[in-house]
Image: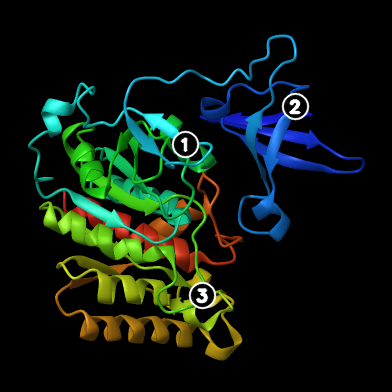
Amino acid sequence: MSLGRSWTGAQELEVIGAPDWQAKALAYPQLIGEVEVGSLVVLNTSALDRGLGTGGYAMVAAVLPDDSTGTSGAPASGPGHLVKARYTPTQAMVLGVDEQESQFHSVLEDADSIDGMPVITADLHSSLPAILIGLRVSAAVLGMGEPKVAYVMSDGGALPAWFSMSVAQMRDSGWLAATISVGQAYGGDYEAVNVYSGLLAARHVVRADIAVVIQGPGNLGTGTRWGFSGVAVGEAMNAASILGGRAIGSLRVSGSDHRERHQGVSHHSRTALGRVATSPGIVVAPQFDTAQGWFADLAVPEALESNEGLAALISSQIDDLRVSAPWHEYVSVPVSDHLHGALAASPVRLSTMGRGYDRDPLAFLTAAAAGAYAVSLLR
């Protein structure tokens, strides 16, 4: 076994097993203890064997005991009594930001409002860096200081926040003030019971100007009308509105997905925002200029024939959403060359469903437009 890259909370390994078998694996030392060259480990390879979206990793379930000590070196439990990934072999006991042992308990005990804070919700984890780029570009154009942003990571995808290399990079670079892991998710700077307490922590503990609520990496979908983890976008919109925030829906858009249900505005967004998000919010509708060079050169699904056809499809889908969910406010945001240039030069890797910015720019431009709009609400 050899050690590979590491980032906050995670360690890559190259693991050798039976003759001629090896795999790339990922360990979370805060759960299972430190892994060293020569350690014997137990792997869970179920998703890897099926070729699912685990980043190509086997997951390290345990480090076997050292024969000399009889112990595995797993870390001792710390303070707190919130149990995440409950009743699984790798359940994590963490200190909740609002529980009685927390220094912030008195701050959150009676907290009931996020005071109009803009809350951006999105379907895919891959939209997070694009949203933050949109925030930063808009703040610069408006001559404002960079807003303080909290990422509220829900549990529809990866449970450990440590899985996301991009979150670690954005946290280290100062793009994010804090990550708050909610529900069964864990590993953030703060832990919360649900999206509501996570948003309250974002406002009153982190003192964030803006919160972004997105599931961790690993969106789950079954190709059915309701069987996808992105329905949580609508639930997050409701939570933000109920707590007195300004809920902003970022649409999932693609110009390159071969699946008809995800072409233009994905059915995930149309269902989550049109049927689940029953509290009034703001839906950001990207406005594309088809004469822009990068758009004119865009490859589109064969059925749409042209980029003009793609733009027309997106416009039509948003119009349909207006009809089905008239309680929302729909705001058109022009997709500027500023956003395109910033995304193309992103220091954080942009990839959605295996497609980079060059292959599916609309996915990231739409997310960036939502970030840009949220900053305008701070003026």
Residue drawn at x 25%, y 31% is 97
Residue drawn at x 52%, y 72% is 222
- The reply to whether callout 2 and callout 1 are in contact (CB within 8 Å) is no
Is residue 131 shown above or below 253?
A: above
Crowding at label 3, few (<14), some or many (≥20) Cα neighbours within 10 Å?
many
Q: Nearer the viewer, mark 3 or mark 1?
A: 1
At numbered mark 1, what does the secondary structure look like: helix, strand or loop? loop
Q: In the rendered image, is residue 286 in sight?
A: no
Residue 355 percent location from the top left of the image = 59, 62
Q: Which residue lies furthest to the top in this view?
A: 68
Question: On residue 255, which mark appears?
Answer: 3
Query: For the image shown, how many numbered marks are present on the structure?
Result: 3
Q: In the rendered image, is residue 355 in sight?
A: yes
Q: Which colour scheme is used?
A: rainbow
Q: Quadrant of residue 269?
A: bottom left
Question: On residue 140, which mark appears?
Answer: none
Residue 2 percent location from the top left of the image = 77, 28
At numbered mark 2, what does the secondary structure look like: helix, strand or loop? loop
Crowding at label 2, few (<14), some or many (≥20) Cα neighbours within 10 Å?
some
- Which residue is the site of mark 2? 40
Quarter of the rendering occupied by the N terminus? top right
Q: Which of marks 2 and 3 is in front?
A: 2
- Which residue is the site of mark 1? 91
Residue 157 percent location from the top left of the image = 47, 53
Mark positioned earlier in the residue sequence (2 or 1) = 2
**Separation of marks 3 and 1 at Cα, in angstroms:** 39 Å
Amino acid type, callout 1: Gln
Amino acid type, callout 2: Leu
Mark positioned earlier in the residue sequence (3 or 1) = 1
